[in-house]
Amino acid sequence: METESEPYVRLASLRQLHQVMADMNTARSLADTLQTVSDGVVGALGYEMACVNLVRPDGDLVVAAFSGNSAAEALITGRVGSRDSWLRRLNMGEQWGDLVFIPHTEGWVLDDDDVPQWYTDGPAPRFEDEWHPSDRLFAPMYTPGVQGGSSGELLGVISVDRPRNGRHPGAWGREALQMYAFQAAIAISNARLRANMQRALVRLERDQQALRASEESFRQAFEYAPSGMAIAEMGGDQHGRILRTNDALCRLLGRPASAMRRYSFSDLVHPEDIGTLLRTSAEGGRAELRLGRRDGTYVWVSLRNSVVADAADGPRFLLTHVEDIEERKRRELQLAHRASHDSLTGLPNSAELRSRLSGRLCRRQAHAGALESLDAAYGHPAYDSPVGHGFDFAPGAEAYDGYDHHVHIAAPEEGRDDGTKGLAVLFCDLDGFKSINDRFGHNAGDAVLIEVARRLSRGVRDGDTVARLGGDEFVILADGLGKADAQDLAVRLRNEIIQPIRAEGRAVRVGASFGIGWAHCGMTADEVLKSADERMYVEKRSRPKQHRRAG
């Protein structure tokens, strides 16, 4: 570096300093930047040795780069000095702007601290501004944009030793070193920023690769899942619209993927299962319902829903898993049917008969409180009926009780046909059936029971119930009949039964006795059946024994 006694600085020196700063700011890595800073002090600023001490994350300073003396470089590169020791050095000596100069007359107190240091040999100074081997000069580096020492964040310290001209730097040399330290801090910060950005880019690329791998895994799991999968919109005008389906769901419903995108699950669900679908919570809800196939049939499925949302709480979607449970449902229905139906004839059994009958009846006691309230409100018994304290019906009418939302059952009056329509209970007992079992065996008896069940079922209306009570006893529940209608039905069914029946290769005949009872609220199912049974025995005893089979 030129001496300050010269009136100008040579243009070549400025060009050299400019090139060093350019190299410092274009270094490819932080390590390269630090070494360039160190080399620039020696190459452009005219010092024999230079050292860059970098602040570590823990606050201590490590020797990160060294230039000018290979032996000293090998001795101290990588060594660490404590932050306290460095702050002690920066707070003593002479302040040359941002620079700190510690003359040999004061520096001896630092000989035993833990800051890595070196010594150059040479004679003692002969004049006042000559450099002593024990003199120390430091150029602190602070965060970019901050000058003036302690107000900024310390990034590191440049240590220099022995100017080539052997003299203390003058005003221009000090300014040049201070400016160089400021530019070095910018270069180091930029290098760290680039390093952080590179690490961030590496992490981002790694995350993106992981995301792509996750998306591909999801796509494959979605597309090739053995059970049905669908993605539907959530919220907005298109809520529930199917966006995507896998092959398994398309095969299950017999619909192509392009056609599935025109529907929502509410369009495909069985009308009776709409309520089940609507009650299913979107947040992890589950339901068992029927979905429509392309051929018009329905399949039982289990739906499980979960919500998919992006990290920024953006568009949310409903991921629906659709499992075919047709076989399980069929087994369940079969088991339920076996529990409620006769294994021989396939008709509802005694338990199912009582359940259906009880479902149509209400007990008088259940409404006593409501009736007493009505009596008190009107000041007199507002209702009267042949059943007791209940409801009075006009002929052929049914009354609706707002207290329990039950449609009450009326019965024709005893002894006359007043036109009232009610729930007729026809109790049927076969005549002559025991002799068939005794003469031809139980297989023949079973064949007769099966045929009687078929004839009874064929002879009633849709919605009527034909049940096997047990043995050779059958019961028919027929709603909305008057007395004459019930009697006509009994005659028709009896005429059907007495026709010859093929059993075990021969024709046999049985007769039938019918008793007609009437169900009405206030009775139990057993009371209704007992009433019809008693009337059947009355009818059976009223006919001569020899006429019972043939009618």
Image (spheres, helix red, strand yellow):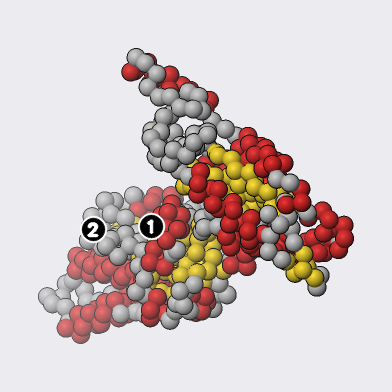
Q: In front here: 498 or 184?
A: 498
Place of residue 174 in the rendered image (x, y in percent of width and height, measured from the top left) = 24, 65
- Which quadrant of the figure has residue 326? bottom right
Numbered disc in front, either 2 or 1: 2
Place of residue 142 in the rendered image (x, y in percent of width and height, measured from the top left) = 30, 59
Which residue occupies the extreme left position in the image? 7
Inspect this view and state whether residue 513 appears. Answer: yes
Place of residue 3 in the rendered image (x, y in percent of width and height, measured from the top left) = 21, 74
Mark carried by residue 146? 2
Residue depicted at x 23% and y 55%: 148
Q: Which residue is mark 1?
A: 104
Place of residue 527 in the rendered image (x, y in percent of width and height, measured from the top left) = 63, 34
Query: Would you call the spot at circle 2 few (<14 residues within 10 Å), some (14-19), or many (20 or more)?
Result: some
| Up/down of 281 relative to 507, above or below | above
Query: The residue under label 1 is which amino acid type?
Result: His
Quadrant of the drawing holding the N terminus: bottom left
Q: Between marks 2 and 1, how big is the CA–CA gap? A: 30 Å
Left or right: residue 142 versus residue 374 is: left
| Up/down of 134 relative to 516, above or below | below
- Which quadrant of the figure has residue 40? bottom left
Q: In front here: 182 or 368?
A: 368
Query: The residue under label 2 is which amino acid type?
Result: Val
Q: Earlier in the sequence, mark 2 or mark 1?
A: 1
